[in-house]
Image (tube, rainbow, N blue to C red):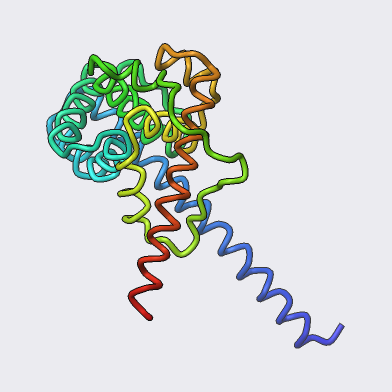
Amino acid sequence: MDCALLKRCNLFLLDSLTSQWIRRQQHYMEESKEQILVKHLLRKEEAAWKELFGAYSRNLSYVCSRYLAEKEDVHDVLQNSFIKMFRSIESFEYRGNGSLKAWMTRITVNESLKHIKQKGDFKSAVEVDDLVDIPNEEEPDFEEIPRDDIMMMIKALPDGYRTVFNLFVFEKKSHREIAGLLGIAENSSASQFHRAKGLLAQKIKEFKMSKKAQYE
């Protein structure tokens, strides 16, 4: 093999190995940073909890807002979620980078559901069965729809529809799991999800038509 070609091959291989090593080191550094934070959280150090709130409150507020329409409710549930985290941090088990965020998200979702179920009319709203059905082929087309507009459409869904839709789509829960969480029948969960999709499809059509009309 030509010496110049061999040298280029060796340089390419060295560069590739160096890049892989840097990526691994970055991963370990990030993981290490999260583990260190958890250790300080376990000691109930105020600075660590302030850091946690600053790093995750925006994302968790977004999680709350998927389930709750009112800003006051989002604020209350977010506050209750961090209190729950503070009281139960000893139960957290580190399972790799990202496990802390996943644990916090689960708590926030559970606190959101708890808040929703405290409404006296929630179960009856979920179980309602006298609405016009929506064809099976009706699917929401989110393409080219801004994220904030999609969020507004989801937030505008009735409580039951919105809750089931979020649990199925974002939390990856089965209808059996949703039924257990909400205390409803499994077929009711499937029905609410089906109707939520239909309502979103209608809202998206209206949104696209209104945008189209603006340019005509």
Residue 116 placement (x, y as % from top left): 27, 23
Q: Give the residue at x 53% y 38%.
A: 134
Q: Quadrant of the C terminus?
A: bottom left
Q: Give the residue at x 37% y 34%.
A: 162
Q: Give the residue at x 40% y 16%.
A: 182
Residue 209 placement (x, y as % from top left): 41, 65
Identify which residue, 49 or 208, lies in the foreground: 208
Residue 27 placement (x, y as % from top left): 47, 48
Q: Quadrant of residue 147?
A: bottom left
Q: Please give left or right for residue 174 compared with residue 167 in the image.
A: right
Q: Using the image, determine if residue 179 lies above or below residue 166.
A: above
Q: Using the image, determine if residue 36 lies above or below residue 144.
A: above
Residue 201 placement (x, y as % from top left): 47, 49
Q: In which quarter of the image is residue 167?
A: top left
Q: Using the image, determine if residue 149 lies above or below residue 137.
A: below
Q: Quadrant of residue 75?
A: top left
